[in-house]
Every structure is written in C-alpha cells, then in structure tokens.
Image: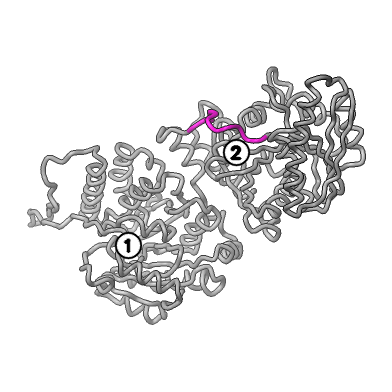
Amino acid sequence: MILLPVPGTDGAALLIQVGVALARVRQARLLILNVVEVPEGTDLSEGALSAQERRQELMRLCRDYEPLIAGIRPVVKVGRQVWPEIAGAARDEGADLILLRWKGHTQTPGQVFGQDLDQILAHPPCDVALISRVDPSGLRRILVPVRGGPNARLALRLADDLAQATGADITVLHVVRDAFEGAERPIEEQAFRQVQGYLEVLAAAGRRPMRKRLALASQVVETILEEAADHQLVILGASAGAEPLGGVPKSLLERLDCGGIVVRSSVPAGVFWPGRPPWSAAAVNKWFAENSFHAREFADLDRLVDLKRRAGVTVSLGLPTLNEEATIGSIIATLRDALMQRVPLLDEIVVIDSGSQDQTVEIARDLDVPVYQHAEILPQHGTFRGKGEALWKSLHVLRGDLVAWVDTDIRNMHPQFVYGLLGPLLTQPRLLYVKGYYRRPIQVGSAVYETGGGRVTELTARPLFNLFFPELSGLIQPLSGEYAGRREALEQVPFFTGYGVEVGLLIDLWQRFGLEAIAQTNLEVRIHRNQALSSLGLQAFAILQVVMQRLEDRGTLRQFRELSPTMKLVRFEENVLGLEIKEGRDHERPPLASLPEHRARRAMVASGTVRQP
C-alpha cells in the first residue's frame, strides 16, 4: 500500500499522478491522507466537521483517478500534529511507501524541512520518498546517482517502477571522489558492486535496461547537476547520518532544474514510534472527529453502486416489524424506489415480523416484499420475544455481504437513512459497523418539541458507557435502530434478544475488533412513534442487565446474588393503584457463525445453491 499525505487539494495533482503511476505498476492500493490539526487547548472532537469537509474534498479528488486505479481511497485523520498521524496511518494500513511533497526549506531554527518532514525522515515507519516538482507525463529520462546501501536500492526500485509506468530510460550514475585513496577506494568500489548486483536482479526479472556510468570527480554535486541537465527527474537515496537527508541530497534538491526525489529506507525494527494508549479521553475525541460521518457525503448513489460493484459485495436491508401498518408501506415504497429501482444499491429488502396483529404483513406482501416470521426461523433453537431475536434470526435469512437494518416506525423515512449507513462501509474498508445518529423531536399531545427524544439514551445508555466503557462514550445515539455492518463481523458476535441488543452489539464489536472498526453517521432528523414512560423503564432495565453481564464477563463486576429477571411497573391511575410485573430479561444468542446449520446455509449461498440477492 502507498500512503500519500496531502495538506490540501491545491497543488496535489502532480503528487497524486506519481502515486497512481507507482500504484498501478506495483498493483498496490493508494491511500490519500489529510490531517486536520486541532490546536492544544481545543477538544479533538471539534475537528469533526472539518474532517467531514476534508473527506468530501478528497472523495471528489479521488473520483478523477478511479478509472486508472480501483484501489484509491481517501482517509482523514485528526490530531495535534501531522507527523504522528502520518506514522499512525502507515502502521494501521500496512503502508510500504510514503510519498511526501517537498516545497522548500523552512526558516524555523533547528529544522530543515519543517517539523513534520524532519520527523518522518528521521524515523520513517516505512520507505519514504520526498518529491519535488515531478510530472510523470513528461518523463523521458531518469537519472539515479547511487553509492550503495538500502537507500540506493530503494532509489533504483522507484526509478524502475516509474520507468515501467512512463516508458522513460534510466541512467545509473556512480560518482567516485578523486580524493579517495588507499583503503577508501576499495570500500567505495565495493558499495557500487552491491548496487550492480541489485541491477542484475532487476535485469533477470525482465525489467527495463539501465545505462550505467562511473564518474571520477572532486565535486559530487556539480557532477550530478551536469549529468542531470538532459534528464527530467533525479532519484537518489538519502545519506546515512543524523540529518534528515544528508548534505548531497539537500544541495541537489535546492539546485535541480528538473524534478527530484530523495528516498529513505525504513528504519530497523525496534526504533521508537509514537504509540497510542488503549484508552484516553483524547483517543475517544480523536475517534469522534475521524469516524463521525454525514449522510450527505454519500448522496452520490451512482458512486456507491460503482464502489459496491468493484468490491464485489451484495447488500441486504432488513426491516424488523411489530404492528407497523401505519408506516411500513411508505417505508418500503420510498426505499425500494430510490435504492433498488433507480439505482441497484440494495439487492434485497426483507421484512422480519414478530407476530404483528394488524395489517403489517399483508401490506408488505402486497408490495411483493418477502416476509418472515422470526419465530419460524431456526425453529430448532426455539424463539424469544424481542427485537434482538428478530435481528439475530434475520441475519440467518438475509443473504447480503453488507447488512443494514432500520426501524419501521419512522414517519419521515428518507433514502439517506440507508445510504448514509452503507456509505462508510463502501468507502472505508477498515470499518465493520456503522450506527446512525440524528435529532429526535418528541411529540407531547399535539405539540412537537425539537429536543427531548432519546430519553433512555441520555439517562441510561450514555451514562453507563461513560462510566464503564468510556471507549464508547463518543457514540451519539448508541440505541439508534438504524445501523449496518459487514456480515463477517456480525456473525462473530452474540445478539441479546430484547432491548439490550444495540448496547450488546456495540460492546462486543468494540471488544473483538476495536474502536476504529466502528463509525457513526448523521442522518439528520428522525420522527417516530414515542414510547410510553413504562416501556422506557423496561428498556432501561434490559440495558442495565446487559451492561452488568458484560462487566461480570470482564471481571470488572462481581455479582453477589442473582439479578431479578422481572420489573415491577407502577400503575397509578384514577381508581387504580398497583404493581404490574413484566419480564425484562434479555437472553443471549450465540454468534451465528457457531451454528452448523448457519454455516451450511452460507456455503449454499456461496455455491449458488441458495440464490444470491
């Protein structure tokens, strides 16, 4: 993978062209990175909106190059300084090469190119190339001055790759100082013999032939400049030593009339590089800024369909229902028209019903949408009441590689409620699970208030996350009913059967795959049926049980007595005063991947015995 940090879209075109040329020859992915710097004293989470804007700019930039390279994608990081984020991205993405743009020397005392370049060049996390004024479209001849060592080999490989991409000829120049006498001359000659051995390896691999020149001179820089006069690019390795590049490469970059690239090979293992603690408030704020998306970033549905096609994935939408006759028809019509008929983003829409007593099932079937009763799926494993049970069983019958679910009591359904969840998964392969968040107006009588919805979220779920699972404290709507994930991740975690399913999924996915695998998307405004306060009490009761169960599993909490599975609801009405007992326990379903019958079904889907959506 090639990592290409860009400070902005202005002036980035030539650098990206170099990256595209190298990535095509190497058959590598190309990651375009931008870092949003947040000054000390300002919360990292305040970089979220800037990150969204930068991401959209980079997506537009990458789109121009997608016909040339399918593996190009943008990523935006948020941090205090640029260089630790470049290093972290290189490590996280497994980069082999970083391409950095050089615009000149800094005037800052004690620095050569500026803090970011100096730090990266001093301790590169992988191979690094510092690029100045290189236009791949005009390359005809490339000059590679070499002495020996890993930097020289890297320079030769980079020159060979660019020659393969552009058809340019390569001249390998070895300048020997005429002042070298006695024991120094054999050392210099031995270094060049090592380079010749590498050239023989390239020739044996059928690479482009290279013209070799040996020059004896007293002024190395002047000799290289003279030779460079009829070349369009000079590539050389950095000198060994404490300086970022060394004297000769630095002088050449200053004086070259053509393009220049200076390379530094990666440092040996064991060199310190800034690490990231398992948890800190800053880490959560950083996650919030980098992994909070907006649905408008993915409004170009043709692009999402193209990304889906290139990835070779299928997409399923599951609609869990229980007495939703007032909304299910409009939800199906809206989503099918926008996401199946106008563009083929969804491959199937399936209703998973939990025993509706109204016309929900009939309405869905009249619209030719498949309907399953969750009690009839995997009947050998029994059945429980609850939304989580419906989701777990729906994952067995849904066939897509990406699976999205949305609640079916939404009165203002919009396609962005679905494509806003799928967009991050299609554009960011590292992501496994995406939650929706939104403003939730609340209706009291005939009045609608802009805030007030999400009472269990603010009074139960988020306080519990902040207290016991602070890594998840950046989730704005952890209980939202709109989310999407990759099947390979969803099948690896258990599902709680009731109200605790959303909290359980977040905790288990985070513990198994890490916070960086989770993201959230702004879906703007969601209007739905508000629940009675007694129902919210049952929801909070179930969530508390799930959190306590996971705390006990981790050894954080020890239960001294069995928890009560029931909750007593107070009935306090005119002429009525009493207690109503409600079952409030969530059962835990195992990961679907652990069921032999589910593995058999997935094998049938893969073989085509069960038709893909």
Query: Does the rendering let one see residue 470?
Result: yes
How many labels sit on residues?
2
Q: Where is residue 79 in the image (x, y as percent from the top left)?
A: 54, 34
In the visual, does 476 lie left or right of 229?
Answer: left
Q: Which amino acid is tagged 1?
A: Leu
Q: Mark 2 points at which residue?
A: 35
Outermost residue toward the top in this view? 109
Per the rendered image, the range of residues in magenta is 265-275
- Asked where in the image residue 365 lies, by quadrant, the reply is bottom left
Of labels 2 and 1, the one closer to you: 1
Rendered position, 339 above or below 417: below
> Which residue matches tag 1?
592
Q: Do the residues labelled 2 and 1 touch (CB within 8 Å)?
A: no
Residue visible at 42% across and 73% down in the picture: 605
Residue 362 locus on image (x, y percent): 33, 80
* Residue at the spot 51% in from the left edge and 26% down from the top edge: 41
Which circle's residue, 2 or 1, is located before the other in the chain?
2
Q: Position of residue 375 (x, y in %)?
A: 24, 71
Q: Quadrant of residue 463?
A: top left
Find residue 181 and name its label: none
Give amino acid for label 2. Answer: Val
| Label 2 crowd bin: few (<14), some (14–19), many (20+), radius 10 Å | many
